[in-house]
Image: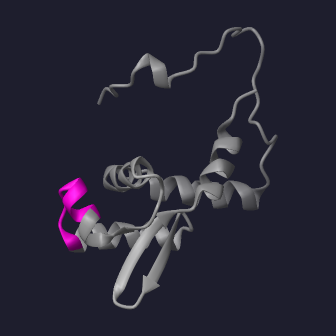
Amino acid sequence: MLLNMTAARIHPLNDLSECCSLGTGPLTDAEAGRYATLFKVLAEPARLRILSQLANGGCGPVSVNELTDLVGLSQPTVSHHLKRLTEAGLLEKIREGRTVTHRVRPELFAELRTVLQMD
């Protein structure tokens, strides 16, 4: 399967003669396990679509019904993916009366970016 990625999203390495390292240095076993779990949760196309919709809306709280309309998936499917993202700590679930919304936890994504940053 070929990925259709635009050049604007890929940042090429200028000098391939130098070895690069992860931005945080070598990971401990616990860190590697934690990040592997997070990336596994993110390795689902529907979850990435949900996250992109949340991010596109400013990462603010969005209801399941709103997300269902935005991503074109059924309510049970969206709820399942939101549950997985929330359990992993990538989203925050907010309950106000009968209304339940979800929002992105940007600090965790900042941490993931740091782990992947190549120096």
Residue 100 in which image quadrant = bottom left
Q: Residue at x 63, y 57 (%)?
A: 108
Q: Please provide percent x and percent y for residue 32.
A: 69, 54
In magenta segment, residue 64: no
Q: Is residue 53 left or right of residue 114?
A: left
Q: Quadrant of the C terminus?
A: top right
Above or below 2: residue 82: below
Q: Please provide percent x and percent y for residue 28.
A: 79, 54
Q: Residue at x 43, y 70 (%)?
A: 102
| Of 64 and 85, the residue lying toward us | 64
Q: Residue at x 35, y 51 (%)?
A: 53
Q: Is residue 85 left or right of residue 78?
A: right
Please identify the dominant SS of the magenta region: helix
Q: Is residue 13 left or right of residue 93?
A: right
Q: Please provide percent x and percent y for residue 82.
A: 38, 69
Residue 73 in which image quadrant = bottom left
Q: Which residues are magenta?
A: 67-75
Q: Is residue 68 left or right of residue 9?
A: left
| Of 21 and 81, the residue lying toward us | 81
Q: Please provide percent x and percent y for residue 101.
A: 40, 74
Q: Residue at x 57, y 62 (%)?
A: 105
